[in-house]
Image (tube, rainbow, N blue to C red):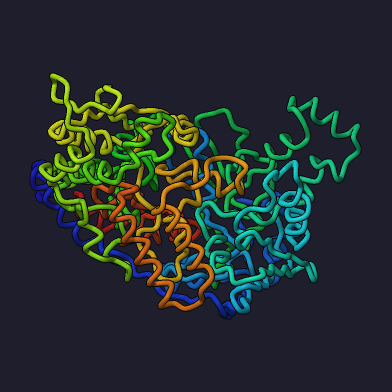
Amino acid sequence: MPRAFRDLKSMLTAVCVATAVFAAPMPVTAQPLDVFVAPTQSTLTVPVGESAFWRAEVEKGQMDAAPDRVPDVPLVVDLEAKGRSFGQQGGTLRTMVTRTKDVRQMVVYGYARLVGYDHEYRLRPDILRDFEVDRGRTFTLHLRPGHRWSDGVPFTSADFEYWWNHVANNPELSPNGPPEIMRVGDDVATVTFPDAHTVVVSFPRANPRFLPALAQASPPFIYRPAHYLKQFHVDFNTVEQMEEMIDKKRVRGWAPLHNKLDNMYKFDNHELPTLQPWMPASTGGASRYLFVRNPYFHRVDARGVQLPYIDVVEMNVVGSGLVAAKANAGEVDLQARGLDFRDTSILKKGEADGSPYRTYLWSNGAASQIAIYPNLNFADPVWREVIRDVRFRRALSLSIDRTIINRALYFGLGKEGGMTALAASPLFDPENLTKWAIYDPETANALLDDMGLAERDRSGIRLLPDGRPMEFVIETAGERQEVENALAIITDTWRDVGIKLIMRPLDRDILRNRVFSGVTMAAVWFGWDNGIPQAYTPPSYLAPTDQVFFAWPKWGQYYQTQGAAGERIDMPAAGKLMDLNRRWGQTRDPVQRAAIWREMLAIHADQQFGIGVLSEAPQPIVVSDRLRNVPEKGKWAWDPGAHFGVHRVDEFWFGEPDEELAQVRE
């Protein structure tokens, strides 16, 4: 063991120093999208070489040779611009998830998108050869001639046409009509298909949300493998054929059958063709899933080596409490999911003891590491009235001792305060960070008394207007020990102001369903995914546009279903956010957009719709000593970034262990 790690104390000190260095925020480059022509891409000047993984199939005549498998104009990645090295094909990358359904992380990590963010967080063509934007309302998408699905069938505008005409506008598959991204207000886009490699999406007004949505971690897939899905669609089969298929699959109708087999994000149908760098090779129902290289993937390096470099990804499903231990034992090659900052010490110890990995500490892009969401749509009428009183939410926030939580859980390295834009964003305002977020139990008590909640029971717990004790139930996904530890600290400080916190861990899916149905009083989750917004970033997630913002699930449902479900907004502050969100989409002036953003952030800071605890706690990343091109300094964020996705896992490759690193460990 190196001398620096002779004891736990010195090891943790080293961790803290490393964190301070590696947690620096990544730059985000402004990029107006109202009038935009995609930049010219590099061209390939050498032939594409054959991979050893598919050579046998090629020699047997079961698969085309590599030069014929890539598009006529492949995406040639600029490794030099990122300071990366050329790699070699081969190897199996091991990683872990804690739930079977999280195989969908392969779509996140693979991050093949029509347009995607590059390493400087600028939008660039990816699956698309290029695109043009006219007046912010007409988007011309150009496909890559010769691009094919993972089963070898051409990928053309017919796949967009199938989705638009037979999925998005089919009332049985899409009861609410086309998704929000294809609308501006109540007006739906017009989509045309001039030729096999061109798709034109036109909106009646500017839609600045369209391109960023295509680059999301969970994007709206506005195309489908038509050749595969037509066999399950009533428009392309006889009634007798459909009935036979429905009976065989044991579903209630053709629409449930189609929807079951047509989820490109879930990645749970190994027969569904894909454009991602790896394709499923397992049929499911196991704790070990394999994904093999897509022989028709569209990215290559400048030497003519088709990506991904890595042949196979092995994804193992393990208990959430085992991720750190298995990483410590060297059983993974790349891991972040399931690891919290509290795991850094055990990871560093394993690294120092000789396990073949290194631990990086990336900055965290979420607006808050831990955020509490009182449910404004809670079904209990008495509690709902209390929760909707802003004095109550402010009192909750004022009664959190963030300094104790920061020191106890993050060695004091987190940034204490409410949920708002992070310091790396040009929209950051320090007043928003501290507003109603400095520990002040005296003011909290005064606010609660002013609400008429002064009466208490014998144990000191305040009483609700109907006489019940004020037992505030917060439900969690039960996946993050740091959340439970933080809530344990909050329990003590809330009791000091007469509120009894009851923590209820649940399965993530159960938690979400309970929140969406309005039976959860409050939930805890991360803050906004994008903590580093720019003026051009759509502010939709600050307004009640989505049920997944746990403070207003019913309002989000109402918006998402065009009034078919959920509840109409009936709070002025929330209505103001919706109005500002609409105004942002109607202006093309970056100064006005920035002003709208600042007003929305100020409303959140004042209203405490989501009560942030702290932010910017570093994310540990475990990387095999043999894995190359993984950035030592990076940003771990869901949107924008897709966690590992923006760092392009397809460019990672396996080499020999670093000799200098091995010498340090000896």
Residue 414 appearing in the image: no
What quarter of the picture does the N terminus occupy?
top left
Residue 342 appearing in the image: yes
Residue closest to the eye, 315 or 462: 462
Residue shown at 78% from the left, 50% from the top: 166
Residue shown at 36% from the left, 30% from the top: 382
Residue 19 in the image: above or below residue 551:
below
Residue shown at 52% from the left, 67% from the top: 585
Give the quadrant of residue 450: top left
Residue closest to the eye, 128 or 213: 213
Q: Residue 316, percent across and down?
A: 46, 35
Is 174 on the left or on the right of 436, as rendered?
right
Residue shown at 53% from the left, 51% from the top: 218
Q: Residue 117, percent across and down?
A: 48, 65
Give the quadrant of residue 664: bottom left
Q: Residue 350, percent across and down?
A: 24, 41
Residue closest to the eye, 358 or 615: 615
